[in-house]
Amino acid sequence: MTNLERNRDAKHVVVDEIKEKLSRSKSVVLVNARGLTVEQDTTLRKSLRKAGGIEYKVYKNSMMNLAVKDTEFEGLQEYLAGPTTVAFSYDDETAAAAQINKHLKAMPVLEFKASAMEGNVYDAAKTKLIADIPSKDILLSRLLGSLKSPMASFARLVKAIADEKDNGTAPEAADAAAEAAETPEAPAAEAASAPADTPATEAPAEEAAAE
């Protein structure tokens, strides 16, 4: 086997390796990491590895060009010039960009070049905006928090219907529970201070006796 054939086979191995990573990726982020010190590069790699679901690799632009061709990441080809390091996100679309974003201030030479996800390609500025978007887990947590109160009201409604079903008063219970769910409860202090079962116009006991 000639050296040319060996080189060709080696290129095919690298290209196939990249294609395999692309097939599993939800997003790909390109960065210019030229100028990072060994210590900074190590810190960045540890951060990405610790976050999980992210792979950070250096590939030649020529290899990346061949690998992204005819894939949803093909639009990245116009950004494959100059120093390029690639971050593959396997679990969350914004994960790699978000993790890299955390180090930009401490590592001024580190720069976004572009990113791609769901068939769309974004330049450096838009990639920075994407990096500021909270992760899916955080967004889901916020959504569940906003739904917590309505869900609690719904749970009370269902319980009221279940409790009264055997008594044949389910419709009335449903109406009452629905009304209670929609009406804010009176403060505890106010409820405690209100007289129990005593009409406001009832005369004091001493006055009634005197008459």
Image (cartoon, rainbow, N blue to C red):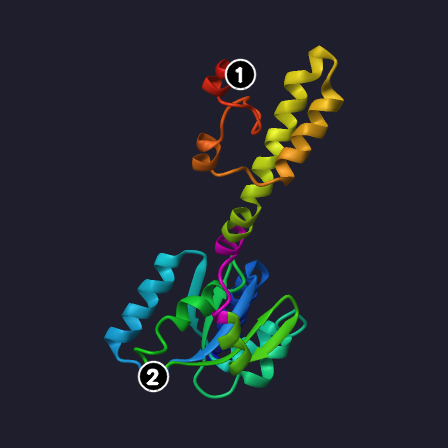
Q: Secondary structure at mark 2?
A: loop
Query: Tag on residue 108?
Result: 2
Q: Is residue 14 above or below residue 166?
A: below
Name which residue lies at 73% across and 17% down.
169
Q: Dot 2 surroundings within 10 Å: few (below 14), some, or many (20 or more)?
A: few
The residue under the point 40% across, 66% down is 99
Magenta region includes residue 135: yes
The residue labelled by disc 1 is 211
Q: Residue furthest front?
A: 211
Q: How many marks?
A: 2
Circle 1 residues within 10 Å: few <14, some 14–19, many ≥20:
few
Span of residues in magenta: 131-140
Task: Tell me if I can see residue 28 in this picture.
Answer: yes
- Say which label, 1 or 2, has the lower sequence index: 2
| Residue at 37% over, 81% down | 110
Residue drawn at point x = 44 percent, y = 30 percent: 192
Depicted 143 relative to depicted 184: above or below: below
Task: Tell me whether the residue at label 1 lies in contact with that at label 2, contact meaning CB atoms closer than 8 angstroms.
Answer: no
Q: Position of residue 92 (x, y in %)?
A: 52, 58
Residue 1 seen in render: no
Q: Amino acid at mark 2?
A: Pro
Where residue 180 appears, as percent x and y from the top left, is 63, 34
The picture places residue 123, in percent across and down from the top left corner, at 56, 81
Q: Secondary structure at mark 1?
A: loop
Query: Splitting the image into 4 quarters, where does residue 37 fall?
Result: bottom left
Is 184 colored magenta in this rendering? Answer: no
Q: CA distance from mark 1 to mark 2?
A: 92 Å
Q: Nearer the viewer, residue 20 or 161?
A: 161
Q: Which sits in the foreground, 39 or 203?
A: 203
Q: Residue furthest left?
A: 39
